[in-house]
Amino acid sequence: MLNPKELDRKIDELFSFRCLPWMVKISNIRRKDKFLAKLKRLQLSIYQLDHSLESNWKVPKKQLKDDWKSINSDLREFGIRKKERERLCRPIRQYERHELRLRRGKTPMDLPMQYLYFYKSCDVKLMRELIYRADDELDLKLSRRDWYTFDLITEVNDDIEDVYEDIHTYNGNRLLFEIHTRGHHSARYLYHEFLSSTLEEFQDRRTGALTKAQKKVKKLTLDIGFETLVLLKKQLKRKKISRISKAIVLKKVY
């Protein structure tokens, strides 16, 4: 596991990138700092699960059980009962299944991109849900649906940003598999088309009167979308691509 300082930095970066502190700030949640601290403890437990999956090809069942015990313990701090915890954690369970599929030779390329990246944002969606539950008036300023495209694109951004870092892990980074299987030109085209069509659909949908918060999220979504297109071009330069073949996950799957 990463050292505590590195983990704190990683969680702070995630929360800032996904605008979670801003959501809490514009909410009516009392003791905002304490609430954010609880969210961060939960995120730490989710990162431990993620670490177990990406650092072990044969993941010990006891390790997964302990990771889930920690996640459930953190969720209890929000006053959420067992059945509801199970419901809220279904997307994370699905993400876990996606990662374990690698051990059976099933790659992320077998799944539709929109479906895959929807589930990759499961941790952030859980954080947002907990914020909305703590302030039932926040939905009047900004609905859960308003975050859909933003969360989708930021997860794509993560795969692009981490594609070379993931060479050293058993991570189901779809871009890495696309480059290895179809070549970097086809991979870049596929991701460019996915991002472009997602942004175009978002712009067509986000018309009419918007609240101040909705306008902010719309701008953030468009900005990160265009930044991700630039990042895609930067990351898939020919001189870097040869490193992909060294990925330890590819040696296990193929």
Image (tube, helix red, strand yellow):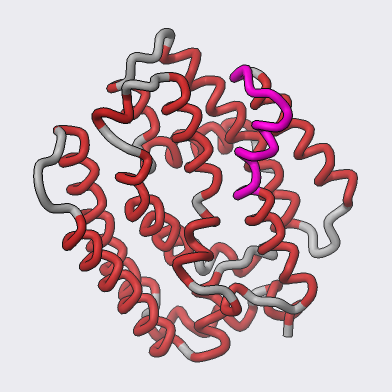
Residue at image x 50%, y 68%? 163
Asked whether residue 79 is drawn in magenta, I would say yes
Q: Position of residue 172 (x, y in %)?
A: 62, 67
Residue 164 place in picture, x, y as percent? 52, 68
Question: 29 or 102: which is nearer to us?
Answer: 29
**Magenta span: helix, strand or loop, mainly?**
helix
Q: How many marks?
A: 0
Q: Is 26 placed above or below 153 here?
A: above
Q: Is residue 205 above or below residue 218?
A: below
Q: Is residue 145 depicted above or below 74 in this figure?
A: below
Front residue (pair 98, 50): 98
The quarter of the picture where residue 58 lies is bottom right
Q: Residue at x 23, y 47 (%)?
A: 220
- Residue 124 versus residue 185: which sits nearer the camera? 124
**Seen from this angle, which residue lies furthest left?**
209
Q: Position of residue 139 (x, y in %)?
A: 32, 30
In the displayed structure, does residue 209 sit left or right of residue 13? left
User: Which stretch appears magenta?
Assistant: 78-92
**Is 53 on the left-hand or right-hand side of 18?**
right
The picture quadrant where one finds residue 65 is top right
The image quadrant where one finds the C terminus is: bottom right
Specify the quadrant that holds the N terminus.
top right
Please state if 178 lies on the left or on the right of 70 as rendered: left
Q: Is residue 91 magenta?
A: yes
Q: Residue at coordinates 74% horizontally, 63% vertically from top-left?
A: 100
Residue 80: which quarter of the image? top right
